[in-house]
Each structure stands twice: as structure tokens, then as C-alpha cells.
Image (cartoon, helix red, strand yellow):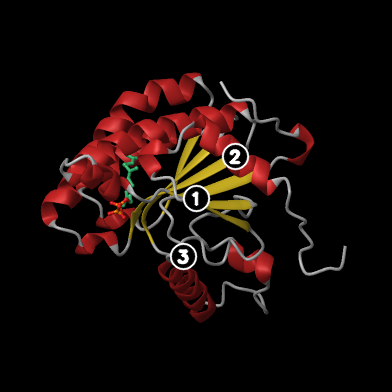
Amino acid sequence: MTDIHIDKSKLPVHVAIIMDGNGRWAKKKGLPRIYGHRAGIKSVRTAIETARELEIKVLSLFAFSTENWTRPAGEIGALMGLLSRYLKKEKEEMKSKGIRFVVSGDISALPAKVRQEVRQVCEYTEDCRGLVLNLCLNYGGRQEILHAVNMIASLERTKKTQGIIDESAFRRFLWTGNLPDPDLLIRTSGERRVSNFLLWQIAYAELYFTPVLWPDFNRNEFYRAIKDYQTRERRFGSIQ
Ligand code: FPP
């Protein structure tokens, strides 16, 4: 239970989260890092349930960055294993709860089995009309922008584009496709960086940093972040 009152008329449509601090959570408990990631999955479930409860439309979760490949092979393998198990386990529940699962990132670099599972869940839930769960996998904001630029350049060479590329034309080439921009970006674990996450899309997002480590980010913490967001005055460059 939480006694935090949320104004339902001022909810963010899209919340993006940098789920940080799994390793430190495990270390504090004298456990191997993978235990932190396992505990992190529990928080993923709680965040999804809380987003549904609050009727947030889109939840983006940064699960694996383009830079995460530099981690030890054992940790990468364990993360892929967790992802694979998560997808198998949650597939039916996502469908029954109307959750549409989408992915942002270059999934061609993921192990073939994981890639296939990711695609299957995307297809299986594509008609769902509830929460959109955007899992960012092998995602990097700069890479996404370069990918879009290269797609446009190759279309340009074959003369398939028409004239000037404006913002709305450009965003269609981003991995996030038709999703609205995040209104709120949350980062756990006390770091105050955006770490190459949704660089184009967070131009006007409100930023919320909390010292809470991701495995401890529960429903109450999510409510606190939303409550804080509701105190912000969003001007989008204007004066009122
Ligand atoms: C950051 O903690 C977290 C990650 C790199 C991965 C996030 C992954 C999960 C929450 C579990 C897998 C998710 C799904 C949906 C299957 P860190 O390891 O960088 O922590 P540290 O900064 O304390 O070392």
C-alpha cells in the first residue's frame, strides 16, 4: 500500500527508466552480481504492474546497452539467460493483461535464440492495446540516431525520400518508431547521467534521480517519482 496521492489528470504518458544499481545491491549483500540482476527482474515486474495501475501508456526499460558488451562474458551470458527465461515465463501473462511488447535497439547482435524469443513475443502481443512495454536491448542513443541517418541516406541514394527531413519524418526512422517521447525519465542508484539512453526522445523529458538501487525500486518508489513529476512545471521552451 502507499499513501501517496496521485493526480490522475497529470500523469505522464510515457515513463522511461534506467534500471541501475543491481551490481551494488548484490555487493552490499555479499552476493555475486547476478543475484542483483535476478532481484532486478522482480522490480521489472513491479514497475510494469504499477505502470498499469496508474494507466501509464508506455513504459521503456533500459535492459541492455550497446556498452554492456564490455562486461565479463559470464555476466552477459547470465543476463541473456535471464531475459530468455523472463520472455518465456511472461509471454502469456503479457497477452492476457493486454501488454504490447516492443523492442528498441539492434537485436541482430543478440544470441539467435534470444532474438527469436524477442520477435515471437513482439508478434504474439502486437494486437494488445494496454500498456506498451518497450524493452531497450542492445540500445544506444547515438547508435540509434546514426542508424536513422544511414537509413535516410540510403533511401536518398535511391531517391525514395522527398525533400527536407523534418523532426516528424526523422523520428519515424528511430527504433522507438511511433512511440511518444518520454515525459519522465527515472534513473535509480544515485547516478545523475542519461548514459546514451533515448537521446533524441528525452529532449523535453523531466528527469528524476533517486539513490534507491533498482532491486529496491518498489511500487511506493514509483509513486514518489510520479508525485515529484507532478510538481514540475513543463514549459517546452515557452513562457507559461
Ligand atoms: C544495471 O545494474 C542493470 C543492468 C545493466 C541490466 C538491467 C537488467 C535487469 C533489471 C534484469 C534483466 C531484465 C529483464 C527485463 C530480463 P548494474 O549491473 O550496472 O549495477 P551497478 O551499477 O551497481 O554495477
Measured from the top left, where is residue 26 in percent x and y? 24, 42
Q: Categorize mark 3 by other alpha carbons within 10 Å: few (<14), some (14-19), many (20+).
A: few
Mark 1 or mark 3, which is nearer to you? 1
Q: What residue type is labelled 3?
A: Arg
Marks 2 and 1 sit apart, C-alpha to C-alpha, by: 10 Å
Relative horizontal placement of residue 51, taking residue 163 as reference (left or right): left
The residue nearer to you, when weighing 144 against 57, is 57
* Secondary structure found at label 2: helix
User: Residue 164: x and y, percent?
Assistant: 67, 79
Q: Which SS class for mark 3?
A: loop
Give the residue at mark 3: 193
* Residue lying at 22% horizontally and 39% vertically, measured from the top left: 29
At which x and y percent is residue 224? Answer: 60, 39
Where is residue 166? Give x, y as percent: 68, 73
Q: Which of marks 2 and 3 is nearer the N terminus?
A: 3
Q: Which residue is drawn at 86% across and 68% down?
A: 239
Task: Name the amino acid type tagged 2.
Answer: Arg
> Residue 198 got which mark?
none
In the picture of the structure, the residue carrying the numbered disc 2 is 224
Q: In screen coordinates, is 212 left or right of 76?
A: right
Q: Name the N-terminal-most of marks 2 and 1.
A: 1
First reached walking from the N terminus: tag 1 or tag 3: 3
**Residue on which disc 1 sits:** 210
In the image, which is nearer the foreground, mark 2 or mark 3?
2
The residue that appears at 59% across and 25% down in the rendered structure is 2
> The residue tagged with tag 1: helix, strand or loop?
loop
The residue furthest left is 74
The answer to whether residue 125 shows anywhere in this view is no
Is residue 30 visible in the rendered structure shown here? Answer: yes
